[in-house]
Amino acid sequence: MLKYSIKRIILAFVTAFIILTLTFFLVKSLPPRGVVSTDINVRYAFYMTQIDLGYVVDVNKLTPELGTCLEHMEIDGVNHYFYQKPILDQYFVWLGNIVTKWDWGRSTVIEPNSSAISIIFSRLPVSVSVNIISVFVSVPLGIALGIWAGLKKNTWIDHTISTLVMIFISIPSFVVISFMVHLFAFQTGWLPTMWPTPDQDTSTKVLAYIIPVLALSFGSICGYTRFVRAELCEVMSSEYLLLARTKGLTKTQAITRHALRNAFVPILPSILAEFIGVFSGSMILENIYGIPGIGDLYIKALDQNSPDYNVLMVDMAIFTTVGLLAGIILDLSYGFIDPRIRMGEKK
């Protein structure tokens, strides 16, 4: 098990490295962009920082062979033409800065000349809070509905739950949140129409969680309900459960001691993975509801009119890391939950 765990962690690092390397080259292959600011001092400070970090060179005359000029400035009578270094040079500088300085680059649009990693971390708590709350809402509701439907198999309760699950699982989350904003915010005025600002009162901030949390939870609730029902129905029809009943266990004892325990073997790892992968699915919702999280930041960094490549790279690294970590937790948790399926164990 330890050998397998180490192997999976190393493989995750290699996968993350390959993904981020490909992303870097693809992003840097796009047309180069300078810093977006009306303040010449901010722009000049940005380029000086880029020169110190090793991404940009400063020459005193127009030099087409260096590529596209990011910007021309005249400071104290001296001409400054700023050019990006070749992509391969930038790549090794980027890796070196991450390893030695933990510097992932500087923002060019969202917060010019600010550290991209600090921008991400400043918005991370909002995304985590919304997604964690949605997990705590969706997991117990989904499991409870799945157990109810499984125990009432082929009854009107089962058919009703299954039909509702099929309906709601087919509706995208951005459609759900758009409908909820229209109905509960604009039509009735019960909830805020968008994410509140920091100076608004506490009650408004609490109410603002309801719409995004419910919109994020609908899909997970339906997924858990369907998964739990399928696993429980399979276990309920198994031979060992019939044997337990013939040995004298009541239906309730057989369900609680055997059926639910065995049905939860494949279910619990998915719950653990969802706790790790808390950011999935919130990207569009954050943008629609105006939540200042990393999902909304990702959309803004991709803006075709004013993209912020460095912030985009850090955001991509966060989502990649979270996705790979969720996969590792999912794989390893099977062995801890059920010793019979431990991987790497000697026979």
Image (tube, rainbow, N blue to C red):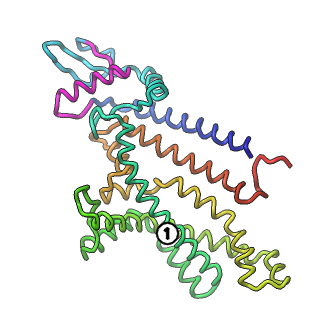
Q: Residue furthest bottom?
A: 156
Specify the segment rendered in magenta.
Answer: 35-59
Relative to the observer, which residue lies in front, 178 or 322? 322
The residue lying furthest to the left in this view is 77
Q: Residue furthest front?
A: 202
Q: Residue at x 56, y 78 (%)?
A: 162
259 or 235: nearer the viewer: 259
Q: Quadrant of residue 242?
A: bottom right
> Whole-percent x and y of residue 2?
73, 43
Query: Left or right: where does residue 7 sit relative to residue 288?
Result: right
Residue 149 drawn at (x, y percent): 60, 80
How many residues crowd around disc 1 within 10 Å: few (fewer than 14), some, or many (20 or more)?
A: some
Residue 92 lies within the magenta run: no
The relative height of residue 335 versus residue 147 in the rendered view (above or below) is: above
Q: What residue is shown at x 57% (from left), y 55% (from top)? A: 273
Q: Residue at x 39, y 40 (%)?
A: 312
The image shows residue 172, relative to residue 163, as above or below, that is: above
Q: Which residue is mark 1?
A: 169
Q: Is residue 51 magenta?
A: yes
